[in-house]
Image: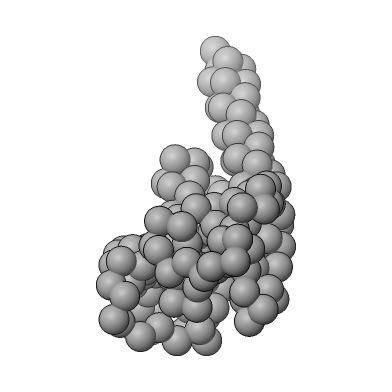
């Protein structure tokens, strides 16, 4: 009974994290009058990352590489849009002006995530630590994504080889 309850709670949590959170942050980026709490945003970003990594490395026996990768790409999407929403609310520097444009904030978020740093947009004083945190997440997550793909493919290949050897040894 407890296992069933935990299973349903886990499913509900996954729906919240991988359905409602992306929709909410996409909408928040373009709804300039809505308020956003930075602590809640950081909580959801962290939760999406932890859930994605947990799924890839703990549920690898399921060999559902496509599903696991889609969760990780969704984590990237949520992170970029959540940070873009924070940047849009606080404003980012473009030359001597502060831009509150959602498109500029999204562009800055992608550039920060990938650590390209073109320099056309810069974080305001209050956003420097946040931008540095996002750059660290991007630097950490991209290699984890590649490792997860290689790990999953290696396990799938080992399982396939084991099945082939087992089936080949039968008379």
> Residue 2: image x %, image y %?
38, 84
- Which image quadrant is residue 131 in? bottom right
Viewer-closest of 9 and 83: 83
Position of residue 159 relative to residue 63, above or below, is above
Query: Please, which colouring scheme is shown?
Result: one colour
Tell me the quadrant of the picture where the C terminus can be found: top right
Residue 119 left/right relative to 35: right
Residue 52 visible in the shown view? no
Q: Residue at x 52, y 70 (%)?
A: 98
- Which image quadrant is residue 53 in? bottom right
Total numbered labels: 0
> Residue 40: image x %, image y %?
47, 84
Position of residue 101 relative to residue 142, above or below, is below
| Residue that lies at the very extreme toward the front in this rendered image | 96
> Residue 146: image x %, image y %?
65, 42
Residue 147 left/right relative to 109: right
Residue 101 visible in the shown view? yes
Viewer-closest of 54 and 87: 87
Q: Residue at x 49, y 41 (%)?
A: 65
Residue 37 left/right relative to 124: left
Q: Residue at x 28, y 72 (%)?
A: 31
Q: Residue at x 66, y 37 (%)?
A: 150
Tell me the quadrant of the picture where the N terminus can be found: bottom left
Viewer-closest of 89 and 155: 89
Viewer-closest of 81 and 125: 125
């Amino acid at each position: 009974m407890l296992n069933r309850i935990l299973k349903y709670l886990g499913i509900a949590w996954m729906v919240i994290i991988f359905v409602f959170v992306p929709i909410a942050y996409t909408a928040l980026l373009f709804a300039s009058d809505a308020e956003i709490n930075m602590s809640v945003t950081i909580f959801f970003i962290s939760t999406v990352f932890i859930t994605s990594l947990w799924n890839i490395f703990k549920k690898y026996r399921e060999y559902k590489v496509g599903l696991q990768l889609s969760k990780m790409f969704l984590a990237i999407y949520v992170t970029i849009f959540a940070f873009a929403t924070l940047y849009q609310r606080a404003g980012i520097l473009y030359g001597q002006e502060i831009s509150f444009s959602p498109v500029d904030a999204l562009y800055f978020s992608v550039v920060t995530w990938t650590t390209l740093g073109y320099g056309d947009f810069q974080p305001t004083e209050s956003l420097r630590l946040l931008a540095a945190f996002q750059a660290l997440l991007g630097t950490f997550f991209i290699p984890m994504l590649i490792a997860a793909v290689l790990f999953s493919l290696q396990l799938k290949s080992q399982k396939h080889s084991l099945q082939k050897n087992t089936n080949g040894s039968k008379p």
